Amino acid sequence: MQFKKYISEILSYKSYPLYVIFVTGIFPVSSVALHVLGWISIRWMIIPNVVMLSLSAYHLFNNNDFRNLILLGWRNGILATLLYDLSRIPFMYLGWDDFIPSLGGWLSNSEENFILGYLWRYFGNGAGLGIGFVVLNYFLSFRRVVIAGILYGLSIFLVLDVVLVCSDYAQDIMFTLTPLSFIGSFTGHLIYGTTLGLSLSNAWK
């Protein structure tokens, strides 16, 4: 019966705006993945990202429930990304390359752009995936939100590793998959997911 409830909720017409919000959330990081795989330049994905953002902004300003979901996910995602980045510092000191300035360069058609890269990381990837997690919780009503957050973070880590393993080009322009980068990335995504879970759990109290 619970499964049927989930399905009916997902297929409900009222849930369509949430699909838009969810896709908007995962679009920035998906754009990065498409770029590093060599399939579509991230510069070609800027306009589609703006379109999706505009559609979500409509719901942000016209529906209180959706506004709360978006703002909660946005806030939690940025906080989680900040803690992730703090965890990267010792690994970067040991030699793990920071590809985020290069991300900014891909966007600006230059070699590197530190500010643009980190803006995309925080307000695109980090905040967007935070929104995605909140929407998933809305549909699935996680009983153990913190564990769900951890699994969510590790799922992102797994997708990243699959991209790196499947594409030498991705490793060339992002970072080489080594024990150091593997452990650093695992740690960061574990912290990211745990923070999302804890933040969402505390928000409902």
Image (cartoon, helix red, strand yellow):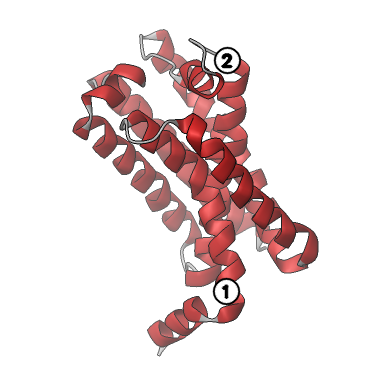
Looking at this view, is 10 or 58 the one in front?
58
Amino acid type at circle 2 is: Phe
Residue 28 horizontal side relative to residue 172, left or right: right
Q: Quadrant of the C terminus?
A: bottom right
Residue 142 image position (x, y, % from top left): 47, 67
Residue 55 image position (x, y, % from top left): 66, 56
Q: Can you tell which mark lies on residue 15?
A: 1
The answer to whether residue 108 shows anywhere in this view is yes
Looking at this view, is 152 or 98 the one in front?
98
Query: 96 above or below 56?
Result: above
Residue plotted at (79% across, 65% down): 62
Q: Secondary structure at mark 2?
A: helix
Q: Quadrant of the N terminus?
A: bottom left
Residue plotted at (76% across, 67% down): 63
Mark 1 neighbour density, 10 Å: few (under 14) some (14–19) many (20 or more):
few
Residue plotted at (48% across, 55% down): 146
Query: 204 above or below 79?
Result: below
Query: 159 above or below 84?
Result: below
Amino acid type at circle 1 is: Ser
Judging by the rendered image, the residue that carries numbered circle 2 is 114
